[in-house]
Image: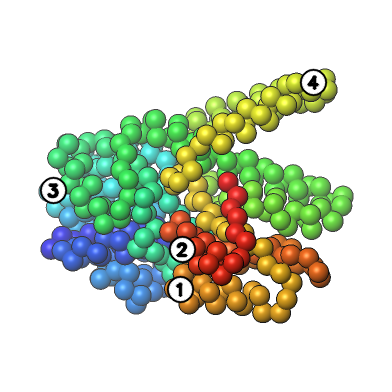
Amino acid sequence: MKNIFIVGMGLIGGSLSLALKKDESFQLIGFDISEQDLNLAHQLGVIDQKAESIEEGAKQADLIILATPVGVTTEVIERLSTITLKENVMITDVGSTKQTIVEKAHALLPNHCFIGGHPMAGSHKTGVTAAQAHLFENAFYLLTPINASRDQLIMLKNMLKPTNAQFIELDARRHDRLVGVVSHFPHIVAAGLVHQLEKMEADDEQVTALAAGGFKDITRIASASPVMWRDILLHNKNEMIRLIDDWQQDMNDVRQFVENEDHEKIYRFFARARQFREGLPQKSRGAIPAFYDLYVDVPDHLGVVSDVTYVLAENKIHLTNIRILEAREDIMGVLRLSFRSENDREQAKQVLIERHYAIYEQS
């Protein structure tokens, strides 16, 4: 029996615990600063055992997983450095930034195996109640070893195998550079767009009504935890400053194109973006959790929405959200159905097509 100690009973920590419980040789021990969340995790069967403190859980652990915000992770590493741990214990984390964390671990835990980790999966929901054993299936799981042998790295991958994730090894600096551009920086842009909308609302309140559709969708990541993103940006400070500088230069160029009414350069700006975006991988999961949405044309008659949901329930397909995008008398309405996985969406597509519904997706 191997003892796996998870610090942090949120979405990621809880989902990791549920995934690892597939291996019956693992004993999952959890700790959270919130006693309520810790008790809830135990009651829901997310963990097998509660630890009253980090010290209690760490001393008996064969693997320690730090599933805490990056700012807290460095503090927990400091605490671990004061505890007598098992000689062969392995330690990893799930943070979205890596360089600061692995450097701290290398300095304070030189005699222990620390392998930085970043499972690139998430959900629009938070907390241990949203934990799902399948959250990491086919997702990229980035590993940044610092003071670990090849055998130890293989051992960690084997222990994490029940997640069904795709493991990729990177050095910490490269990790922060790549994730910075595909995840961290987009959160800044999304938040900036929302701030711009808020400023305009002061002059014209009607703008928020117009923003309820597509604008809200493209800025959804601005709803993420302010504490988490504050810490991520500060831990990836150098990359963020570089990306902000590059972005400002690009925006200055676009401003110049518009001011000069340069039709050709404005066209190329959008055409190049469109061409590159359409070449991005369609099926693989990236840094920002994807929508798994279907759009269904439905006639305006009584009971049509309940018929769609009945078809899905009848086939045991889990629906996470449903939204009516347009429904006016005598015209077709549009339902947007959101699912938790690509597999659920594909199943829904098949059964709804069999019922003669018109289905389409947006790429």
Residue farthest bottom in this picture = 302
Q: Give the residue type at disc 2.
A: Gln
Foreground label between 3 and 4: 4
Q: Are marks 3 and 1 in contact (CB under 8 Å)?
A: no
Percent x, y of residue 13: 36, 59
Q: Are marks 1 and 4 in contact (CB under 8 Å)?
A: no
Tell me the residue that label 3 is attached to.
88
Q: Tag 4, which secondary structure?
A: loop
Q: Give the residue type at disc 4.
A: Asp
The residue positioned 43% from the left and 51% from the top of the image is 121
Instruction: Answer whether residue 181 is visible to the viewer in this image.
Output: yes
Percent x, y of residue 80: 26, 50
Foreground label between 2 and 4: 2
The circle drawn on residue 262 is 4
Q: Give the residue type at disc 1.
A: Asn
Structural crowding at the residue carrying mark 3, measured as other residues with C-alpha within 10 Å and reported as few (<14), some (14–19) or many (≥20): few
Percent x, y of residue 334: 68, 63
Q: Is residue 130 above or below residue 267?
A: below
Q: Earlier in the sequence, mark 2 or mark 3?
A: 3
Q: Earlier in the sequence, mark 1 or mark 4?
A: 4
Tell me the residue that label 2 is attached to.
347
The circle drawn on residue 315 is 1
The residue positioned 69% from the left and 52% from the top of the image is 214
